[in-house]
Amino acid sequence: MYSTTVYLYQQITKVLLIDTGGGYFTARYDPVYAKTLTINKGVDNVLLFEFINQDQKPVNVTGSTFVFRLITQNGDELLLSKDMEILSAALGRVKVVLNTADTINFQAQPASYSIQRSQGSYVQAAFVDDNSGARADCNIVDSILPQFQDSANLTIPSIYGPTSWPTAPPNNNWPDWALTPQPVNATQTTEYYSSQIPTTGASLTTIKMDLTHYTGTIKVEGAEDYEAAWYNVTDSTEYLNYSGTIYINVLGFHPLLRVAFNQSQGWGAQASATVVDGVVTGITVNNPGYNYIAPPNVVIVGNGAGATATASLGASGGCGPITVTNGGDGYWPVTFGNPVMAGVVINNGTVTNLMYR
């Protein structure tokens, strides 16, 4: 267990103000008192000011009123004007409170401020910077309430398996070199990747995606630059026929990130649909495929809409019977004379809405 010390302090600024009491001052104003104010968005900012003369003595501000103005850095826009409250007239102490409503709609930016003193018909500027200027620097910051950051889209990789995969197990009676096409190891790890995420120095990156009947693993990898080797920054998480939204939080400083998908378990299942009067009434599994570890995803495609179906996991890792859960409507031949009215795609699920921030 460890403890952290935090500090709660007030911003007190000494400001040069011409003393109208009639005294003559020979001392030069010390610029060490001029400093940049910090205004935090979304909270109450209590800004205290002490008015001093060139002898570093308090100026009596009895009978005076003060206005605090917040101005853009280049001076072309007034952001805020607010009356100030006198705390001690004899000691020249005043304050202004910029509350949540005053600051919540500001953009984080470097800005400037000024203070105006009025006493009867006399209007005077307070010299708030080290060059006897009437405008000084301040920073409007998001440190308390960060500025909203939109999520950015990532590309979705092709995750349905390479087309060179075998549709049947290799014939063990022949050596590998004699087979055409050459067989591919059914248990090889085949990964597909998202587009890359430049983190721009952020220590936390959140990745979001929607999964539909997804079977496979997902992890996040990092790299030092575009030419460096990739390394794992999260554990590889396995999903079995999962549907839903997932979020991955990546902690630490990694210049580049990407999402790695692996759906290499299960391939080759084929099926055909039976359509009656534009409605899908049944699906027949023509080839159960191989090495599925969860029921695969079934997608019905064609001119119609609304048809859905679910598959089961069969014996020996093949696709089992497929049940039509909604027949949809409007499924007619894509081209004249074509007997196929609806196609059936069997895969290990899909990823959509892949985003990060």
Image (cartoon, rainbow, N blue to C red):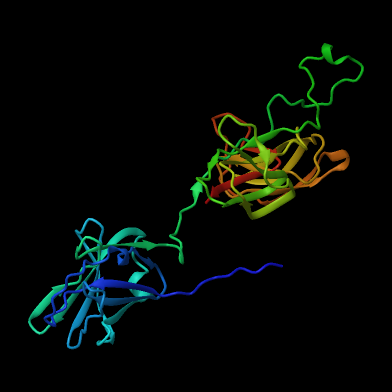
Residue that appears at 31% across and 80% down: 95
243 left or right of 254? right
**Quadrant location, the N terminus:** bottom right
Residue that appears at 68% across and 29% down: 162
Q: Nearer the viewer, residue 117 or 25?
A: 25
117 left or right of 320? left
Q: Is residue 308 above or below residue 19?
A: above
Q: Nearer the viewer, residue 336 or 309?
A: 309
Q: Is residue 334 above or below residue 350?
A: above
272 left or right of 42? right
Q: Position of residue 174 (x, y in %)?
A: 89, 14
Q: Nearer the viewer, residue 322 or 91?
A: 91
**Residue 270's quadrant in the figure?**
top right
Q: Position of residue 245 (x, y in %)?
A: 62, 55
**Residue 29's quadrant in the figure?**
bottom left
Q: Residue furthest right?
A: 173
Count of number-bearing discs: 0
Q: Nearer the viewer, residue 146 or 278?
A: 146
Residue that appears at 54% across and 49% down: 356
Q: Position of residue 243 (x, y in %)?
A: 67, 53
Residue that appears at 81% across and 32% down: 187
Q: Residue furthest left?
A: 121
Q: Position of residue 218 (x, y in %)?
A: 69, 45
Q: Residue furthest top?
A: 178
